[in-house]
Image (cartoon, rainbow, N blue to C red):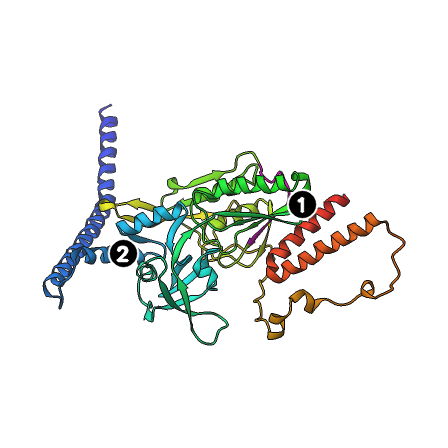
Amino acid sequence: MKKFVMAALGGTLAGIIATTQVAGPLVAQENSRNASVYEQLDLFGDIFERIRAQYVEQVDESELIEAAINGMLTSLDPHSSYLSPEDATAMRVQTRGEFGGLGIEVTQEEGFVKVVSPIDGTPADDAGIESGDFITHVDGESVLGLTLDKAVEMMRGPVGSEIIITVVREGEDEPFDVSIIRDTIKLTAVRTRTEGQTVVLRVTTFNDQTTPNLEAGMKEQIELAGGMENVNGFVLDLRNNPGGLLNQAINVSDSFLESGEIVSTRGRNPEDGERFNATPGDLAEGKPIVVLINGGSASASEIVAGALQDHRRAIVVGTKSFGKGSVQTVMPLRGDGAMRLTTARYYTPSGRSIQALGVSPDIVVEQPRRAPATEEEEDEPRSAVNRSRSEADLRGRLNNDSLSEDEIRQIEEDRAKAEASAKLREEDYQLAYAIDILKGLSAIEHKE
């Protein structure tokens, strides 16, 4: 018995010694790392004091500290940043759908300010700013090398004031200036209309208004069509939608899905990951959906497009999306400021990350650039230019005796619809293509 106890004690002692031998270097390594961090913080304090005491001009200590904090955050990725109390307040206002500015979503790429997308109906959109444009100067002053927040601050100003931005655009030989008048940006999150038998849902942003606007707009258009039986499908237009609130992207996806995963997020720690699933109920009642995307579709837009694509609930049409597959958390800080920190990546239901890759459309459809009109076209209506004469225009032509008046009227109505589709193709080729897909699916369904 004594031998057994001694053996057990000996084993325990050996375990303690072995654990100590393993843990000892780890503890020493951790202590060394902590010591190095404290040394770096001491170095920061020394530099701060020397700047205060010896810089050629008087400095504002609070601005200096804010710049240091922002520099630390922006070194991580283009979407992490410090928000001053004023910026934090402006951000909260923006998520409610009304704010002042030009109406563009921007990011930073290799030191340059890049337009993610212009927002529909805003001064920037009216001035012709396009997704993918690079802004090099604001009122003649270069923005190269500035933080994104500083560049954005330069573009802010009183409502009604003019700003001149210099733009570099792919396909243009030289940079060019664009004059924009600042205005209050009032976002209508969702605009709805009907083209023929297709309901078009134009979602411009994901803010607190998006899901309620979507539900109300769909209900209104279905009622105007005389019921769901008169609707052949829906186009969910997410082009140039820079994103917004994650919960709104989940709600919009859920509006068209009966079940299954919508999106998952994975952070640094596996236990912090989240999965969001759809609940029963499809606002479209199973009708086919086409989702339109382009290079200005980012973040929340990509969550919706990816979810509907993975579940084969929609056909995705257009061009590759922006590729922002990360989640930012806004954390309040003392003094009413806040920190926007990238805390997770998100993944579509199939488990793919779109970070830096984007959502690839099922059918790639480029939006042709509209050629400038000639002087003749400007002076003469377009329909008159393109119209050709036919037998029906000839004086004394014979009447068609094989059709009734009702049949002739139906043919003329169908022709008018076809001409309206052709006109839409000139105005918005991608949207017309999406509507044609739904027409084709509807025709096949009726034949069956």
On the question of residue 99 being in view, the answer is: yes
Residue to which mark 2 is pinned:
70
For the residues bearing labels 2 and 1, Cβ distance under 8 angstroms = no
Is residue 31 on the magenta stretch?
no
Position in image of residue 118 (x %, y %): 46, 58
- Name the residue located 75 percent from the left edge and 67 percent from the top edge: 388
Residue farthest along the bottom direction in this orientation:
173
Which amino acid does the dot numbered 1 rest on? Asn
Q: Which residues are magenta?
A: 282-292
Which amino acid does the dot numbered 2 rest on? Asn
Front residue of 59 and 260: 59
Residue farthest along the front direction in this orientation:
395
- Relative height, residue 38 to residue 286 (above, below): below
Residue farthest along the left direction in this orientation:
53
- Relative height, residue 98 to residue 261 (above, below): below
Q: Residues within 10 Å of mark 2 (few under 14, many from 20)?
A: some
Position in image of residue 229 (x %, y %): 68, 39
Front residue of 310 and 387: 387
On the question of residue 131 being in view, the answer is: no
Residue to which mark 1 is pinned:
232
**Is residue 304 shown left or right of residue 407?**
left
**Is residue 427 shown left or right of residue 135?**
right
For the residues labelled 2 and 1, the Cα–Cα distance comes to: 51 Å
Image quarter of the C terminus:
top right
What secondary structure is found at the residue carrying circle 1? Answer: loop
- Name the residue located 50 percent from the left edge and 59 percent from the top edge: 295
- Name the residue located 43 percent from the left edge and 73 percent from the top edge: 175
Is residue 290 on the magenta stretch?
yes
Q: Earlier in the sequence, mark 2 or mark 1?
A: 2
